[in-house]
Each structure stands twice: as structure tokens, then as C-alpha cells.
Image (cartoon, rainbow, N blue to C red):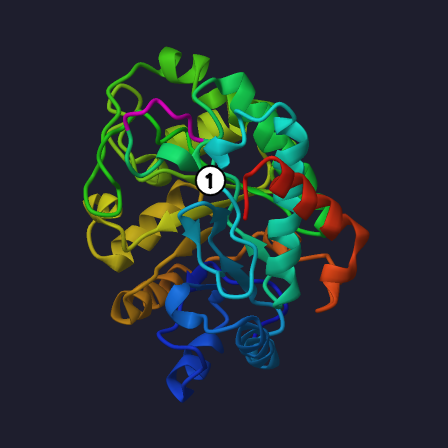
Amino acid sequence: MSSGLNGSLMVDIAGTWLTSEDRQFLRQPEVGGLIIFARNIESARQVRELSASIRAIRPDLLLAVDQEGGRVQRLRHGFVRLPAMRSIADAPNAEFLAEQCGWLMATEVLSVGLDLSFAPVLDLDYQRSAVVGSRSFDGDPECAALLAGAFIRGMNAAGMVATGKHFPGHGWAEADSHVAIPTDERSLESIRANDLVPFKRLSKQLAAVMPAHVIYPQVDSQPAGFSRRWLQEILRGELGFDGVIFSDDLSMAGAHVAGDAASRIEAALTAGCDMGLVCNDRGAAELALSAVQRMKVTPHQRITSMRGKGLVTTEYRQHPRWLTALNALRTAQLID
């Protein structure tokens, strides 16, 4: 059983409830988190029950979801359909609206027993990347940083910490790292002057960062998530970031450059990731678990800071701020 310190591997399950195999897998102390996907979700009540059943086995596990708004929103039925972040920038009171979105998102995620949503996206919208697109707040780095900062304030007010992604920026690379290995041929100076700006501006407000499965050949031959240059020298050293580093999903095609699942988790943790995600492939997750067990990794205490801190009840819709946020987004015609 876990000592109370989260492990180094985040995994997933296939269905809407735990199987006996899932329970056995989640008992492994090297497993530190679980992420849910649309296939795991039927209703708010069911997710709440699933969260409770996971906590009964491992109270210390981080429970996560991707709930950005727009097209990346796993919790849908019975939840507010948040706008794509790019649509906020054009509103006259964009900063206020971004903060309301962050609060609404975090409140709903916390209300079903989850700890965090991997948000916000800090990638810039160059209108090149299909995988980023409207998930980005803006193409201008200062505007993106301002709106993301407001979104984070809203998240924090609800009791959720923020994860900025995808460091150092996925907006220029055209290929989708879910199905290919994208490259960004620009110089470090160009990336530093643009894409790194939101990460630098928000380095003290972010509790976590998720690196991109993108290769920046002028900086390193490895994707950012496997690169000590990016994670140790630039993110930790140059930007002074001291929070958690989560890998992006190591089952994605962009991660396959490192080899099998065991090689991928080893590469991610060795480069400086605190927790590696291995999703949508239980065989790969088991291989990664064996690798982590062999490595005898001691998880960093900083991982425990990612737990949700809001005592959100199911009556959150009676909260005055809920009505304020909802009305503001409706008035701006960002939601129905």
C-alpha cells in the first residue's frame, strides 16, 4: 500500500466502473494518478461514485480529466458547455470572462470528486496547428498570458491548481502529436521571444507544466518531454519553474521516438518529468509500471500539491458566483 506519497505513473481504465483487475492495478504504489476520458463518463453522479470507489482503494491518487472547454471537454452531460478559449479573446471584457470560465470549469470538475483538469493551454495560435487551433487563447503571447492568467485565477479561487501545456509551445508545429512526430524548426531565440512568454509570465502561478511531444531540432534532438535541455536547463533553470512536470500521454505517436512503453516512461522520468501518463493501452501501462518499479523512483513531494482543495458540494449551482459567471458568459454569447 502507498505511503501517502503519489507514485510516478498516471493511468486510465476502460469503463465506467472499476473491474477487479483495475483495483489490483491501482493498488500498486508506483501508480500515482488516474485520468478519465469520455468513455468513463455517463453522468455527474456516476463520476462521483467512480471517484469515491477509487478513493476507497487509494485515497492519495490524483484524479484528472481534460476539461479545457471547446472541443476538449470530457464532462458534457449535465455540465456547462464551455466555449473554446480562442473565442474569449474577442470579447470586450475578455479577462473577466476568462476568469469566470476557469472558476466554472474547476468548480464542476471538483464537484464530481476529481482533483484537476489539465488546463490551461498556453500554446499560441499561429493558425498552423490543427491540434491547437481554438484551444489557444490567442496568437499574441502577451494576450495569451494575460487571459490564461485570469483563467488560472478562476481555477485557484475554486480550489484547483493549474497545469500549463504544451511546453515550450505546440502552436507552430503542424503535425498532430497524437498520430505523428511533429517538428518545429525554429531557433531557440524565436521560441523564447514568442512561445515561452506565457510560460515565463505564469511560471509562479502554474502548479504544473506538461511538455509537448514535439522535436525542436535547433535545441535538442529529443521531444521536449524527453529532453533534459528543455525540462532542466530551460524550464527549471531559465524560467525558474519549481512545480510538477507531467508528461503528455506516452502512448501518443509523438512519444514513440523513445521506443516501447518502458523506454518511454524511463526517458520521461530521467529527463525530469515527475509523473508519466500512459493511457488507452493497459498492456503499455503494465510495461511502464514494471519499468518504474525497476527504476525505484522516489516521487517528489511536490506531486501532493496537485490535489483539489475545494470543498465543492453538489449544490454549487446555488452559489452566487455560479450565477454571476453563467450570466456573464451568456451575455457575451459564449454559451447557450
> Residue placed farthest to the right in the image?
320
Q: Is residue 114 left or right of residue 42?
A: right
Where is residue 218? Give x, y as percent: 26, 19
Q: Is residue 95 left or right of residue 175?
A: right
The dominant secondary structure in magenta is loop
In which quarter of the view is residue 208 placed? Answer: top right
In which quarter of the view is residue 261 placed? Answer: bottom left
At 26% from the left edge and 53% from the top edge, which residue is drawn? 263
Does residue 293 appear in this view?
no
In magenta, the rendered stretch is 123-128
Where is residue 76? Give x, y as percent: 48, 61
Mark 1 neighbour density, 10 Å: few (under 14) some (14–19) many (20 or more): many
Does residue 289 appear in this view?
yes
At 35% from the left edge and 31% from the top edge, which residue is drawn? 170
At 34% from the left edge and 61% from the top edge, which residue is drawn? 279
Figure check: 16 above or below 272: below
Helix, strand or loop status at disc 1: loop
Figure check: 21 above or below 303: below
Confirm whether the magenta stretch covers residue 126.
yes
Name the residue carrying label 1.
84
Where is residue 105? Give x, y as percent: 60, 51
Q: Nearer the viewer, residue 62 or 84?
A: 84
Where is residue 249? Give x, y as percent: 35, 52
Confirm whether the magenta stretch covers residue 120.
no
Residue type, label 1 = Ala
